[in-house]
Image (spheres, rainbow, N blue to C red):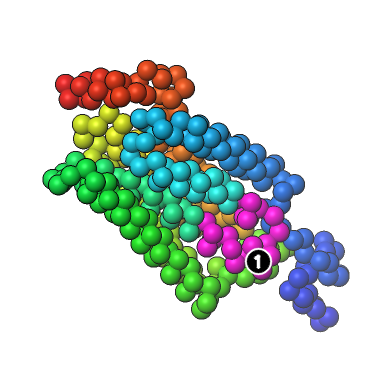
Amino acid sequence: MEKCMKCQEDQWSNEMRDTCIPRPVEFLSYREGLAVSFLVFSLFFCFLTNIVLAICIMYRDTAIVKANNRNLSFILLLSLNFSFLCPLLFIGRPTNMSCLLRQVVFGNIFTLALSSILAKTITVLLAFNTIKPNRRMSSLLGRYLSTSFLIFGSFGQSVISIFWLLFSPPFPEYNTQVEVGKMILQCNEGSVTTFYILIGYMGSLATISFVVAFLARKLPDAFNEAQYITFSMLVFCSVWISFIPAYLSTKGKYMVAVEVFSILASSAGLLGCIFIPKCYIILMRPELNTKTGVMIRRTLSKQ
């Protein structure tokens, strides 16, 4: 005890307590089974999204694709495609660049997706609840409204991200307090408050989209997406509400795993709830993807 020596921050004493040895560095590595499973699901859903996008482009002149603003549908699919690739920034050894980009890229891509969903839903709601002077005016109204919601929704998250990167950017750090004898290589978010503001902004857009879609769910449109959007927003909000306590109760690499799981689950929910029904009608029920089919479904919906 008279010759007790404290080890350095990146070292730990051996079993005999007579020398210092390097602490093992731990992070969510590509060599781990958990990371490999995330990578497989990420690439699979990305491939599936590209297939859906290709189907929508091939049948872009059909009734079901043209309904509810096909340009917003393409933007939503592209943003979902990138959202499935976001876990690639979270898996692997944290670096200065990956720590700077991962939360900002994830937040802005998801905000673009949610903004496009909100724009689609509000456009449908206003189209059925406003008196349109003529067809050309209603077309211009819908176009400018959808573009405005898309731009302003994404702009707010961009301001938050720029403020975050300028004043308190994330950086990689070694954490020796999480586990005894180990050193966790992780990304320090810089400002935890800004991180939760980013998540909260996404949650606000999702909540507004859910409320608007719920109000428009019974509108008499054959290809009205409001019902699908309502359910997709319910899945999205459920995932991210459960993310917060799960994220706060885990430490080290498992915090990263929780966030990656939430990204994949919420993105898959949006893709499945909104676009799988469309693809089913396009590929399996083509007789409903016509003007005659539209009239039949509209008559059934009114009954």
- The amino acid beneath tag 1 is Met
- Residue located 56% across and 38% down the image: 50
- Residue 222 sits above or below residue 166 on the image: above
- Residue located 33% across and 58% down the image: 148
* Image position, residue 181 (x, y; %): 73, 62
Image quarter of residue 8:
bottom right
- Residue located 59% across and 63% down the image: 101
Q: Tell me if 95 is positioned left or right of 5 in this view.
A: left
User: Which quadrant does the C terminus fall into?
Assistant: top left
Q: Do we see residue 273 in this rendering? A: no
Q: Dot 1 lies on which element?
A: helix
User: Which quadrant does the N terminus fall into?
Assistant: bottom right
The magenta stretch is 87-106
Q: Tell me if 205 is positioned left or right of 212 in this view.
A: right
* Image position, residue 282 (x, y; %): 43, 25
- Residue located 58% across and 40% down the image: 46
Q: Which residue is mark 1?
A: 97
* Image position, residue 66 (x, y; %): 37, 36
Q: Do we see residue 58 in this rendering? A: yes
Residue nearest the viewer, comparing 158 with 247? 158
Q: Tell me if 91 is positioned left or right of 74 in this view.
A: right
